[in-house]
Image (cartoon, coloured by chain):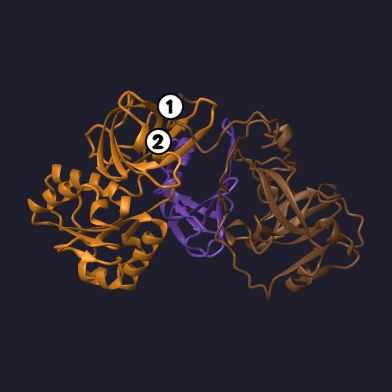
Amino acid sequence: MGIVSRGFRGRGHSDDSGRLPPGQYLTTDFPVLSAGPTPHTPLDEWTFAIQGGAEPVRWTWDEFRALPTETVTKDIHCVTKWSKFDTEWEGVSIDTLLESVDHDRAYAVAFSDGGYTTNLPVEDLTDGKAWVAFAYGGEPLDPEHGGPARLLVPHLYFWKSAKWVRGLSLRDEDEPGFWETNGYHNYGDPWREQRYWGD
Amino acid sequence: MAGTAVLGRLTWLVAEVVEGHTETPRVRTLVLDVPGWHTHRAGQHVDVRLTAEDGYQAERSYSIASAPGEPPALTVERLDDGEVSPYLVNEAAPGDRFELRGPIGGYFVWEAEGADDPLLLVAGGSGIVPFRSMLRHRAEAGSTVPTKLLYSSRTFDDLIYRDELDELAGRDDSLEVVETLTRVQPPGWTGRSGRVDSDLLREVAFPPEREPRVYVCGPTNFAEAVAEGLVGLGHRPERIRIERFGGT
Amino acid sequence: MKRLDGNSIAGVLEGLFGRDMTLATGRCTHCGAENEVGALHVYRAAGIVVRCPSCEAILIRIVEAGDRTWIDFRGLSTVEL
């Protein structure tokens, strides 16, 4: 730890509620962290696809928005050490999407506009643990924050909640994604502080 | 590379605030004492790291405002949603300490020695800071390379180093300073108004045939638009160096 | 979208390589554009992503863990120091 600067209080705060994973700081704003230029796919060209099942399945934006949705309130945790409590999202549960897919795959890779990927076990996407979210705080999801739709997997570090998500590729073998191939932990459980390789 | 050769890896030093000067309502210059400081080159910057009592850390970069050979000084603009800048502008007092790494950078550097080409500096807001270092250095070196500074600010009161720039230009025929105010101009204002666009650049900048070395510094949108404008006027991209300032 | 440039990671790179890297030039493996590090586009996400200013292809990825750093240069060919 560096020398303490008298009187400095940053945006991040400690918290005693027990809701803050180890090494995290609570923030009230919503930092924008992006790996590249914000993509702008027009909604009439947007699709969400799930590959790797018996047949590929795809939804257009209108088809996607016709699916049943859920509104959830979740704490989110970024590997860069900020956490935000009680974030409200509206989205389609991955369980709902997977109802249309006949598969027995164990792993998934989420892929996004701009080429970003992240990998997860399928069981971390099911049973009410993940959504494709299109609204945040009651408003359509801002492009800076991943709009029109992003993956939302709040129980893992937020790099797994891929912005500008366009689909899932289901597979038998795990395939580390963009950050998982460059030092970030393959699984990413904030409660076990799994930030980096070897943690 | 002379001036940046270091004996080991770049390490975090401890900076102590010696004094602070208010430049404008939101901008303050901090003069620092940094044991282990290595003389910097005009245009270089430092990384500043603050640690709170609970271990929370924040890190930002700031251009060095002083000339090579002068004690290190930083000029910081307080950003509304800032995290480090409010501390440096409103809180840090003589005796306070923080971590600092630098001097850093070889790309956005200008040296008087061996400089023959006309020099064009275009600054947006607090992008003026590295140019103050360059202009002080230029004056101390007795350089007379034809130099133009085009400085864009929202209002008159936001012009940083106003008197110093007037004074530098006033005593040096080879230095021209043009200021443009984008939001509000005071009564009697004799400078320019409005954003730095192609028209203003065409009017103020050296023509491309003079092959100036160009430095542009300011917020990303400003710096990119100015660089694009200059290229559009015929300046070669390889003669233009940009330093983008981030927020907070 | 907030982007900066290679100047903003000069300290990180100098810490890793022991010398200023902002004047090092590299060629983008995607479009062939050659640029000094100081001119590259830099984005800060979970880690640092450095992209080609001409085509936005990824040139460098950096993840800093405090005591370890991972750096992937695959997008750059032929770096001249």
> Could you classify mark 1 by the number of other residues whose Cα lies within 10 Å: few (under 14), some (14-19), or many (20 or more)?
some
What is the chain identity of the residue bearing mark 2? B
Tell me if C49 is positioned left or right of B34 in this view: right
Q: Which chain is orange?
A: B
Hey, which quadrant is residue C76 in on the image? bottom right
Q: Which chain is brown?
A: A
Q: Do the CB atoms of the residues marked 1 and 2 lie less than 8 Å apart?
A: yes
Hey, which quadrant is residue A39 in on the image? bottom right
Q: Which chain is purple?
A: C
Tell me if B117 is positioned left or right of A166 in this view: left
Which numbered tag is attached to residue A164? none
What is the chain identity of the residue bearing mark 1? A
> Of residues C56 and C3, which is closer to you in this image?
C3
Tell me if B155 is positioned left or right of A60 in this view: left
Task: Identify the residue at horizontal 86%, vertical 52% (top origin).
Answer: A172
Which numbered tag is attached to residue B87? 2
Kind of element beneath mark 1: loop
Kind of element beneath mark 2: helix
Three-letter code for the amino acid on which mark 2 is drawn: Tyr
Q: Is residue C25 visible?
A: no
